[in-house]
Amino acid sequence: MTARWGLFLLPPLALTLLMLGFTQFIFLKSSVFADLGLGETGTAFTLENYIEAVTDPLYLNGMKLTLELAIGVVALTLVMTYPVAYVLTRMPARTASLLLAAIVCSSFVSVAIKILGMVIIFAGDGLVSRFFRWLGVIETSMQLLGTMTGVVFGYLHLAIGFMVMMLFSVLQTIPVKLEEAAQIHGASRLRVFWRVIIPLSLPGVLNAALIQFNLLMGAFVTATILGGGKVLTFPVLIQRTLVMFNDYGLASALSAVLLVIVLIINIAATAAVTRRRVAA
Amino acid sequence: MRRWRALPGYAWVGFVVAFIYAPILVVIGASVDPGYRISTRSYLVFPPTGFSLRWYASIPSSFWQSLWFSLELAAIVAAAALLIGLPAAFGLVRGRFPGRFAVDALFRAPLQIPVIVTGVAFLQSFYFIASLGGPALQGSLAGLFLGHLFLATPYTIGSIAASLQRFNPRLEEAALTLGASRLRVMWRVTLPMVMPGIYGGLLYAFLVSFTEVTISVFLAGTSTKPFPVMIFESVTSDMEPSVPALSTIVFLGSMLLIYAMQRLVGMEALLRSGGNST
């Protein structure tokens, strides 16, 4: 009986392996040949593309910026959404599901459209600028379009709705009784939160944070629009290499570098939490 | 007393929801503003200077076509993701065989690969297939479908697997003991119990496909342009003034869809099966 269930896996597994293996192989293959333009590639194996990808300061700075942005925004998103998800799980069910529905609806709106809204807010004579002028903080106008602050706001919008949904599904699995038990034994609310809720939700939270991190490491739309060509994250650089310079070899090598860095971080973070769990 | 203590938490929830909705409300406001300027970089203004539906009347047919195309694409992707996700989730949760963790990790790999890398990889692969004389997948519905399916399936598998894990196998045993056939048990006991996971999986897959831009930018063609790519191009080059109106229509449509889902299974059941299970 149990052996038969495993057989169900075969078709989906074969399909996933094919899509994953084939596409990854093809792009990795093109990263080790020189790009001769017009879609032609050299036939001799070369590491030229990789050498350029890891030595050119443009790409090094791009990687540093992307890592800082992704890690910073994931941390900020966690701090913002963890309490929200927690309050939602402890709130009357009707209100909670209404708010969750609102958040799910908002995630149907494409990033490009949310960014359009952000562009309006951040534009030279947009809402934010006028508000700060009204406050008297700034004299003329506040330009967020084409700045780092704008990109951070854009990334937050990219991550926040989905993060609330994922954290809600994690926190919902922690029974209220555990909290009550800890409180009966004299723990303060803060202590319960710190010693019960957070440790129990840690694996799920890490999983959610990693998914968001990977998402931000691979997104270029937000930085393209809100960065106005001035915030050159790694994905923006890859897209430029591909679309503007048509250098498929270099674009593939850059993608490979990005892939390896992201995978290492994923494996390291997962291993760290697994070890912690085993130790505990 | 208890109510007062909950107040800061509620206020924070309100703040975050307001933060999420700010750009959407601004877009809705702009959509009914008869006189917004789209010249230079100053784009649209908020609050609206008046009320009119003129932008709703002036939506170009190319945008309607691309919206329709995106809906079709997302529906096909969701259906296919379910066909793959259902057997995969059953196999993962109920199968007992060596290397289960490796299989699980493999199914989740698309979530670990940065989306732009997936985009580059699919683009190169499609060029490679075409160079061998195969079908031209770049710029085709089939190409976009494959790219989106790759991204969406892990969410569907996760959602169904989560509801399957919470399922008590004793219920199946009870039905079997009472004389139901295996097929009947599957149809009348198991499937109804994992239904929220199935709906959740469909919703996530639809959502991933419908809002995906990064991969779509690489794989779209001139006649196969998903809606988010259309908006992206409009925002980065010459601004089409009816984009806010169209976006508002999409938003209202999603509200209807979510309302229907809510009536069907309930929001909590939907999210309990979250996208990131096991």
Image: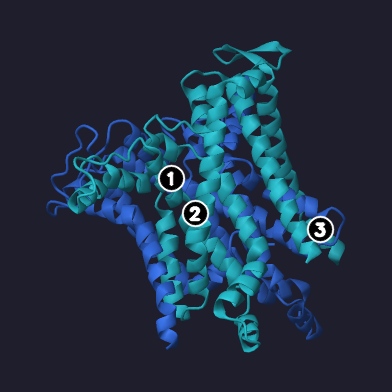
Chain colours: A cyan, B blue
Left or right of residue B43, residue A55 in this image? right
Q: In what element is the residue under mark 2?
A: helix
* Chain of the residue on which disc 1 is drawn: A
Q: In what element is the residue under mark 3?
A: helix
Left or right of residue B248, residue B12 in this image? right
Front residue of A38 and B142: A38
Left or right of residue A3, residue A30 in this image? left
Front residue of A249 and A21: A249
Residue at x 37% of width, y 37% of height: A147
Residue B82 seen in the current view: no
The residue carrying mark 1 is A152
Q: Do circles 3 and 1 both sit on a common chain?
A: yes
Which quadrant of the figure has residue A174? bottom right
The amino acid marked with disc number 3 is: Gly
Q: Which is closer to the viewer, label 3 or label 2?
A: 2
The residue carrying mark 3 is A6
The amino acid marked with disc number 1 is: Val
The residue carrying mark 2 is A76
Image location of residue B76, percent across then percent down: 53, 49
Vertical side of A47 occupied by B265: above or below: below
The amino acid marked with disc number 2 is: Leu
**Is the Cβ of the residue at disc 1 closer than 8 Å to that at disc 2?**
yes
CA distance for labels 3 and 1: 44 Å
**Is the Cβ of the residue at disc 3 closer than 8 Å to that at disc 1?**
no
CA distance for labels 1 and 2: 10 Å
